[in-house]
Amino acid sequence: MSDHPVVNIQDVPLTDRGHAEAFAVKWGRVGPLLGMTGLGCAVHVLSPGKRAFPFHRHHVISEMFFIVSGTGELRYGEATYPLRAGDLIGAPAGKEPHQIINTGNEELRYLAFSTMGEVDVVDYPDSGKIAVAAGIKNADFKTATYVGMGRITPADYWDGEG
């Protein structure tokens, strides 16, 4: 963290994240560089054909995205929308699941802004998973005191309680 209130997007350190063929992103958190604790911001850089994260919906935090450069597509619920530089995207908590995909021929760069909380619940419609995290510090799920990921089997409140 710096005492300086300005950081250039080109100076944000990026790390490689991903999984399998479809998911690959260069990603860097901006908020901590600026001492932000109530608002998250991260830089995302996607190569053509890639996506950063699975199709998902947060139930506690809200996200907003700003397309800096490139073109792509937004999956939003059952709809898809073309994306280009200058577009703003809203993903309010508990609304439609979303995913950004680079469908262009060059890098897609975008900023992701988010509210911050100590708890989040995320569902993944394509795979039927649910993630729950509590005790999150500074939007870093690695700091959570509890993280659960899986598929829920319906049960009565008293099931297994003796």
Image (cartoon, rainbow, N blue to C red):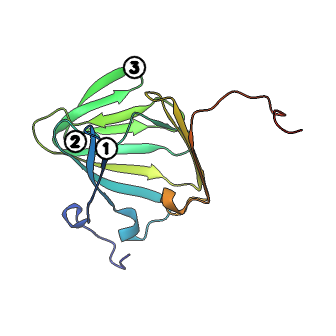
Which residue is denoted by mark 2 in the rendering? 86
Which residue is denoted by mark 3 in the rendering? 78
Percent across and percent down for residue 37 are 49, 65
Which residue is denoted by mark 1 in the rendering? 52
Q: Is residue 127 above or below residue 18?
A: above
As shown in the figure, which amino acid type bears the numbered disc 3?
Answer: Glu
Name the residue: 55% across, 37% down.
130
Q: Specify which label sits upstream in the sequence, 2 or 1.
A: 1
Percent across and percent down for residue 44 are 27, 51
Label 3: element kind: loop
Label 1: element kind: loop
Which labelled disc corresponds to residue 117? Answer: none
Label 2: element kind: loop
As shown in the figure, which amino acid type bears the numbered disc 1?
Answer: Ala
As shown in the figure, which amino acid type bears the numbered disc 2?
Answer: Gly
The picture quadrant where one finds residue 145 is: bottom right
Looking at the figure, which quarter contains the N terminus?
bottom left
The picture quadrant where one finds residue 137 is: bottom right
Cα distance in 3D space between marks 2 and 1: 19 Å
Name the residue: 66% across, 29% down.
153
